Image (spheres, grey):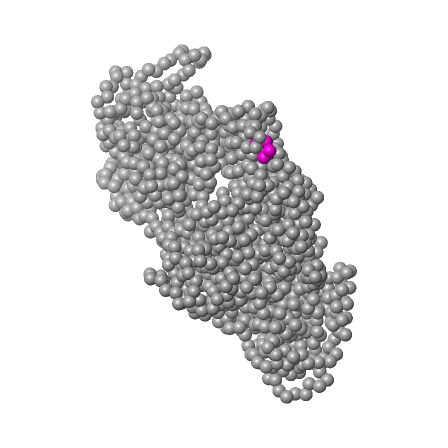
Amino acid sequence: MIKTVLTLMTFVCSFSILAQDYFPKNDGVTTKNTNYTAITNAKIYVTPTQIIEKGTLLIKDGKVVASGTSVTIPKNAVQIDASGKSIYPSFIDMYSDFGIEKPKRPAGGRSSQYDASRSGYYWNDHIMPENNAIDQFKYDSKKAEDLIKAGFGVVNTHIQDGIVRGTGTLVALNSNDDNAMRILDAKSAQYLSFSKSVKSNQAYPSSIMGSMALLRQLYYDADWYAKGNITTKDLSIEALNNNKSLVQIFEAGSRAKNLRADKVGDMFNIQYVILGGGDEYERIDEIKAMNAPLIIPINFPDAYDVENAFLASTLSIHDMRAWNQKPTNPKLLADNNITFALTTHDLKSPKEFKSNLLKAIEAGLSKQKALEALTTVPAQLLGKSDKIGSLRNGTYANFLITSGDIFDKKTTLYENWVQGQKNTIENRDIVDITGKYEFNLAGETYEMTLSGELSKLKSEIIANNKKRGSKIAYTDDWVNLAFTTQDSTKQEFVRVIANVDANKNLNGKAIMPNGSEMGFFAKQTETKKDTTSKKEDSEEDKKDSVATVSPITFPNNGYGFETLPKAETLLFTNATVWTNEKDGILENTDVLIKNGKIAKIGKNLSERGATVIDATGKHLTTGIIDEHSHIAAASINEGGQNSSAEVSIEDVIDDTDINLYRNLAGGVTSIQILHGSANPIGGRSAIIKPKWGHAAKDLIISNSPKYIKFALGENVKQSNWSGGRFPQTRMGVEQVYVDYFTRAKEYEALKKSGKPYRKDIEMETLVEILNGERFISCHSYVQSEINMFMKVAERFNFKINTFTHILEGYKVADKMLEHGVGGSTFADWWSYKYEVNDAIPYNAAIMHDVGITVAINSDDAEMSRRLNQEAAKTVKYGGVSEEEAWKFVTLNPAKLLHIDDRVGSIKVGKDADVVLWSDHPLSIYAKAEKTIIEGVTYFDLKRDEMMRDQIKKERSELINDMLQAKNKGLKTQPIKKKEKELFHCDSE
Amino acid sequence: MKKITYILIAILCTSFGFAQQTPAPKQSQPIAITGATAHLGNGQVIENSLIIFKDGKLTTVSNASQTDLSGMEVIKADGKHVYPGFIVPSSTLGLTEIDAVKATVDESEIGEMNPHIRSIIAYNAESKVVESMRPNGVLMGQIAPQGGRISGTSSVVQFDAWNWEDATVKVNDGIYLNWPSSFTRGRWWLGEDRGLKSNDKYKEQVDELVAFFNETKAYAAGDKTTTNLPYGATEGLFDGSKKLYINVDDEKGITDAIHFAKNNNVKHVVIVGGSESYKVADLLKQHNIPVIVQRIHSLPSKEDEDYDMPYKLATLLVNKGITVALNANGSMERMSSRNLPFYAGTTVAYGLDKEEALKLITSNTAKILGIDKDYGTLEEGKSATLFISEGDALDMRTNQLTHAFIDGRLISLETHQTELYHRYDDKYKAEKK
């Protein structure tokens, strides 16, 4: 019975207003309704800023004819008095899959597939601009009902599958008419994303950087096709070119991905409307600088269920903060004048929309901005301001009638009109029967109290000072009541059915347990709402009050900075200084750092205004440089093809990775983030400094030399897993190189000839290598392949810059010297694969003795934070001098990265990237006390200790707040331990 | 003469591609090491020491004194350092040669309750990886199976032997158990979130263990007319002849594991891994349970954890009075085991006294493994399993071995790797000339 009440909302089935008049009619006579509807005496929000008090809204044929205080109401108008009610334009959701079946992964195996499954289309299955939502669209009245209840009138729906997803359809949620009426625009926008289609197993792209590169290449190809240079048919590109003029909506899904999407668009002068992730607040300045309109989900996380202290200890500060910070996201976007629409996307159901929206408003989002984000903004972004999003004359009559302020918790949404069709959600004229009643039945006198919301009415019946069990339901002026008899030993009920009269009295009949019927009349004795409901209200208010909002730090993790540290003038006195220059190791020496550079080295230095750091007994060195690392990246391998020269790690730097901070704690100040080793030709590198707190783009060293990862060995021939693409042998690897470099030469020749050519990002990259503008760092293991690759390079007249890993470098060190390649190796790794059977820890020493520039690298997030120890192992294995061993992790990698003019030694004029060590830096007993990059102290042992206390405190405060939230009865979510994947060369 | 033999053997090995150095013969003559700084492994240091061993046993460990050294081979070690051989526990050395080559992998058996699975018989005494331990001073190890709930039975070996039988120091010393995890990873291939979530089968998995132990006890009490290999293999836990090594990391797991072992009358329990053991130090102390700490060179297990938590974990436990040893488990654990001394060295940078740190890889390990009567310290009457280093053996720069002895036998410090080194070093030196 309760259920009936809950589904009170009914859809009024009326005649279709706009029957297509050229259609034959066989079910009756032709009718045409030319009447008007006038809703009078309402507060009308024509737009979020244009508000009419006590106005009239006049509609006809599903559209607004007029609104205002002095609207002339035509005679043939049905008038509806809406005194005390408010009218709003209904909401628009720009990012929806309404009426589209969720794409399903086809049954069967998921073996890797390298080629496309289709023909006549683009070579990549995940590019599907030819898909049109309208072809799959099936109006879903059930889902429409949920959206209508949540206040929505129009949605833009699309097929949520693939990287280019084709066109979307703009639909009015008009359940009374058919598609002819409700489809506002069959091709309203084009949708894109970074995610592959679930329907295809085509491996490429296997990473987000691959998706970015694929989109870029697609745009180049589309241009080439448009110019008539491709003689064969490509239906995908044709569709893409046709969709060019549409709004382009990009599903990014997080702060970092927003920036990545925008970056792709900017290259081709496309301004995407970007679906964000709700975490934009973490770096709002960067989001603002994108200058892109956003669609923002409001799926605010519930508090974690932290009652179990063991589990609670696994939560990170970042994840806990999200609970109280995320609701502030819309406010911060609005404060920064960022254009955004809101969406129900990511919510389990539109039913959760209002409560989340109220949270955002409570967190400071203005009601006007909220309304704009749901009406005028999406309408304008879709280019449909003349049709939807407001109640201006001529727009669709899509509006909501409410009991008052729509963004108030207590407001009732009575009706949602779509294209002039009324959907009743709550009866606007329902009589309030809460209060006290009295009735007599079979000689007994009963007292009855009705309370609560009308749709969920509660009853309490007392007779002879004894409470009876009872249940009540109230629908359409009728009350259904059942209560127990005096005899509590039996489960017997008196059932009542009664009509509510004008005086709120209940008039009907009672059916006794024995089946006899008698008249029933209950008189209202008190109308005042009982006090209990008021108490409930105030408790509900309390429930909603959000706990204090944690301050945002950079990055927004533990150990983040509330304000970024600045460069200082620092004077280190009386240190043992490892210069890495001719001066060697200087005892009792002072070093002055000013304006981010090494300013002076000497004895008894002084500088006004400098912070003096007594380094007596301590060692000052240049910062460690890791030639081979995979930290701080959202993806590492683009393994979908045997060459991925088109992808770049610079596209996917992750500025929140705690390993950046841990690297600082190990004295690391420059890092090459390399692509993995899935393919012979890998992706482009990012050379960064771990400037903890700065945004990803600012971690990348400015004007850093260009690098690319190549790979030899077992990984590229897929030895240790089942693959299937070419090459599967070292013999094949050579041919991959010969093939690609031959093509690159031909490509360049064509380009230089001045004839038209198809721009190919991959070839552009390879040409850079041939011209010595891009350096190769090549993952390498056994001597045969090392030798082979040098020969290939020599054949194409370029030099390999670095062999990384280079475990059998010692076997061909003379040949390497002759070629002029450097070696960046592990100190002592071996025996994990067959190809490292002959890897020896003396490798670095031998290569160094032969005259090769040698570095020791990590390829591992743990090892990278103690590379000083790894360098020291070369003293043990092969007797390298301490001074030279130290260069293996500083000056030599700087040379291999061509940044030794800026970093790698303590020399006046070089970047002030220095580390203060507690002890001899190669000693196992040494600890980095301060790590400074360009004069800024990013790691300080003292601050670290303070941060530990602060994290402890913040953690317990957050846990306390979450416990309170649970006690108040708020929903909680189970604890999940989030982990960032740690990447190595072979990471998928 | 002896040296020439070694070189000859080395050359032969290289040219025929044999893996292992030839094991050293028995000690034939008393050996005296004079003048070295002796780190006894029990916290004591003797500067300018005299160490004498005969028939594989230490007969003198003292300050240098006027002793008649005639008839002895005398090794002058002034300025050098002598240490007991380092011991690596819970190791898979000799069970797997090359991780990526399945045919060489013998470390975990299928099935859940495998106490009867014995590591010793698969231990490859001729492993190239095992011999590479010795130049760093790691001379002994406990070889333990992995996998399943109860992985199997471990044994203790020394690293210079013709075969596993000769290598054995203590056979079937303990049983390794993997405690149920508090978290499980989402089955991402089924579309679940890849992250970790509470393991809702935890209780069930613990109950399985309880049931298995109950069955074992019932079996032990019965007349055993029908042999049950797994039950039979477990019996030693109750009479104290075997130790129970429990791999477990989290606070709750450790607490549950301790109560489980105590409730089941397991005589000797050792916690292995124990990344959160510092949180339950009092409980560990109360029950006198030692901890074999996870590899010191690890990342913190949580994003916000102190960056140096793994570095200082052993220190935190030692300061609470708990017996701690170090292992090398984790990725690339076998080849990394030779870094055991540097793991100990790192604990010094994070608060431990150097001689205390040394105990973590010598006497404490010997105590935990139950071989401390003969190994783990330089004390008279114990085995002469020791080495001489040019300098501080816990620091890479100075860990330079000149001699190493196992049971008094002078073992080779050459390896597959040193041979390759010499071969190519010589090649380039010859080319330079």
Q: Is residue A33 left or right of residue A896?
A: left
* Camera-side residue of A691 and B172: A691
Q: Is residue B309 visible?
A: no
Q: Identify the residue at horizontal 54%, vertical 53% (top origin).
A: A895
Q: Quadrant of residue A797?
A: top right
- Position of the C terminus of chain B, as image quadrant, is bottom right
**x and y percent of residue A401 in the render?**
30, 30
Q: Is residue A596 visible?
A: yes
Q: Is residue A841 left or right of residue A648?
A: right
- Position of the N terminus of chain B, as image quadrant, is bottom right
Is B400 situated above or below A310? Answer: below
Which contiguous range is marked in magenta? Answer: A747-751
Magenta-colored segment: predominant secondary structure: helix
* Camera-side residue of A928 and A823: A823
> Does the magenta-highlighted stretch encompass residue A748?
yes
* Camera-side residue of A107 and B412: B412
Q: Identify the residue at horizontal 41%, vertical 21% (top origin).
A: A181
**x and y percent of residue A11 in the render?**
38, 27
Q: Identify the residue at horizontal 37%, vertical 21% (top origin).
A: A14
**x and y percent of residue A666 in the render?**
49, 60
Q: Is residue A639 left or right of residue B23?
A: left
Is A206 situated above or below A170? Answer: below
**x and y percent of residue B289 in the render?**
54, 70
Total of numbered circles in the picture? 0
Q: Identify the residue at horizontal 68%, vertical 71% (top origin).
A: B169
* Camera-side residue of B296 and A563: A563
Is A964 situated above or below B191? Answer: below
